[in-house]
Image: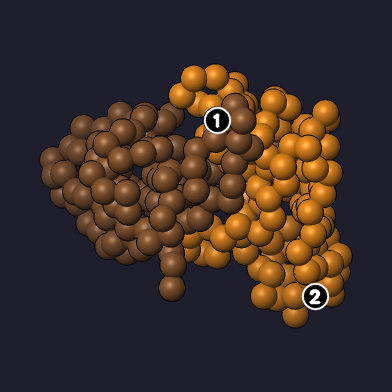
Chain colours: A brown, B orange
Amino acid sequence: DGGITQSPKYLFRKEGQNVTLSCEQNLNHDAMYWYRQDPGQGLRLIYYSQIVNDFQKGDIAEGYSVSREKKESFPLTVTSAQKNPTAFYLCASSIQKVSRRESGNTIYFGEGSWLTVV
Amino acid sequence: KQEVTQIPAALSVPEGENLVLNCSFTDSAIYNLQWFRQDPGKGLTSLLLIQSSQREQTSGRLNASLDKSSGRSTLYIAASQPGDSATYLCAVRNRGYGGSQGNLIFGKGTKLSVKP
């Protein structure tokens, strides 16, 4: 079945550690996204990528890094510079990011990854 | 800056009731608006997508309307069931400028509880 796979589901990070969250999609989507969700809050965009080897900062990129070496993969690294990393992280994809001519298509989400600092 | 607000934050209804969830946004320059469902500890599932040129979309017991000029959308759920219990989020795809163009801006959601 086509979809978005995030791993691990649960991850614990020690102070000063970098951790990487995996996101893989087999939907052949061009655009991929990482969001952060805090309890009772809406989703906030961390990074997004429209094509391979290109990505852009979202609203809360500080303390995070990404790569897009393959179309189907968009891993997120939470670095030690992120002071409050405990949150629920969601990866998403869509056919393409919108341009002035395109109104955009449905966005699909993975099941999320819980990151806790211990 | 685009802001999306959802009212109420939480709603509890008895099974069988028809209900309306509200979403408002401050900037009418949007490409589309999307409604999502989120179960506890899970990802988001897309329910309905309304393009900016459309007025409403329907899927089964769900009907979403869009009034772009007033910055409002409603999600109508008919004959609610306990299985409808979840958090419902709306998001607008922003026209914006530069890097923000095309990005989704989310509301905080409405937590719905349907009691048997």
Residue at (75, 75) in percent of width and height: B81
Q: Is residue B60 left or right of residue A66?
A: right
Cβ–Cβ under 8 Å for marks 1 and 2: no
- Tell which tag, 1 or 2, sits nearer the viewer: 1
Residue that badge 1 annotates: A99
Q: Nearer the viewer, residue A20 or A100?
A: A100
Identify the mark at residue B15; answer none if there is no mark.
2
Residue B113, given in percent of the width and then of the height, sits at 69, 66
- Dividing the picture into quadrants, the one containing residue B24 is top right
Whole-angstrom CA distance, mark 1 to mark 2, is 43 Å
Q: Amino acid at mark 1?
A: Ser
Compared with residue B61, is residue A81 higher up or lower down, i.e. above or below? above
Q: Is residue A111 left or right of residue A21?
A: right
Q: Nearer the viewer, residue A96 or A76?
A: A96
Compared with residue B9, is residue B39 higher up or lower down, i.e. above or below? below
Residue B30, given in percent of the width and then of the height, sits at 67, 31
